[in-house]
Structure formats: C-alpha cells, structure tokens
Amino acid sequence: MRPELLVCAPLRVESAALRGSGPRVVRTGYGRRRSARSATRLVGGDFDALAVAGLGGGLDPTLRAGDVVVGTGVFTGERTRPLCAPEPLARELRRSGLSVRLGTVVTTDHPVTGVERLALARTGALVVDMESGVLAPAAGERPCAVVRVVLDTPRQPLIGPGMPWRLVGALRRLRDTGAPLLRWSRTVAGPGSQDTVRSRWSKEVP
C-alpha cells in the first residue's frame, strides 16, 4: 500500500489550486489561531506524511513572484524546527520545471511589510507566512515538508500593480507542486524509510 500524503492548505484559493493535483488536501484556515485548531485535530490523523503548501511573502530581494521555496526549517520566534528531506523535494519540484530555492520559512502572527520584512530578511530566512510553524507539529514523528510559492516581495508588494496576474501565476505554480509532493512522500514515507526519517525529525534546533 502506498504511503498517504496529507497536504494542509490554509486558504480557500490554495486548497482549490491543489485539489485534483494528486494528494489529499485539507483546508486549515488563515492565521495562527485557525491553524492551531486544525493542528489539534490533525495530530492523530490517518496519514503517513504531512506537507504545508500555499503562498507566502518573499523576504530575500532576489526572489521573484512565482518562485517556490522549500523549507529546510520553519522558525516561529522560539526555535527552528527542521523539515524532512528538503533536497529530494526540491529535486522533484525542479523536475516539474519550477524555480526552487531552499531556506528557512518564518511564521509570524501578523502580515509582515516594510521595515519588519527587511529585518526578517537579515536573518537569512527566505519567506514568511502565518501558518506553517503552527501546522508542522501535527506531523509528530512523521515526515513533514513546507512549500511556499512567493506571491509578493519587497519589490513586488502585495497591494500594487500586477497583483491579480501574480496571484493567478502563483496559484498555477502551487497546483504544479502536487505531483512532486506525492513523489517526495513515497520516498520519505515508503518501506524502509521510517527509522531514518523519524530520527532526523526528532532533532530540533533551539
């Protein structure tokens, strides 16, 4: 029996983009509060690997709208939680023609703009969201990944010319992450992979 991947998509437009792309998708809600409620429900869920996938705000000035960020870890302000096998996931996404970067995802409790965004960029993180760090613990010892498609950047603000077209393009790229995520899950949650994955997942960086 193939391992089952569960993809958490916080927003309605994100879950709509991912449905039909292969994995089982659940809409978890916007922001930390709704994410915490969803994470509580998911802890004992019937899945073998978990992914959080959606749109995010780019921090690195070299990122462009539509770029895909694979999290190497997710930072919530207290600790950085490592994520499972980001390099193989990045390879699968690149095989599908996506522009992929690897780096830290920061989860905050509010939208980040201006000076605050620049301060987060100086930490070396690539992208910011409001859900991934809250949802990731629901995986427990199971493999977990975070994939965020950049929607806005310091040079391409959330409110500004071209946003509708950037949103359409980002959602198309989000849809294209579904099949690579499935291939990743079969690698990290398949027979013989559990001991290695659980050992790696159990280590947290303060």
Image: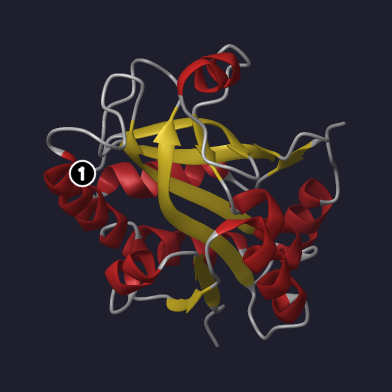
Give neighbour class at mark 1: few <14, some 14-19, many 20+ (Cα, 10 Å). Answer: few
Residue at x 20%, y 56% (from the top left corner): 172
Res. 177 in view: yes
Nearer the observer, 3 or 79? 79
Q: Quadrant of residue 22?
A: bottom left
Residue at x 70%, y 83% (from the top left corner): 45
Residue 3 vertical placement versus 62 (above, below): below
User: In the rendered view, how is the structure colored?
Assistant: secondary structure
Q: Give the x, y percent position of residue 118.
A: 51, 15
Question: In this rendering, would 193 be left or right of 178?
Answer: right
How many marks can you see? 1
Q: Give the x, y percent position of residue 132.
A: 60, 52
Nearer the observer, 34 or 144? 34
Residue at x 45%, y 77% (from the top left corner): 25
Q: Quadrant of residue 101?
A: top left
Q: Which residue is mark 1?
A: 97
Residue at x 36%, y 64% (from the top left corner): 14
Res. 142 in view: no
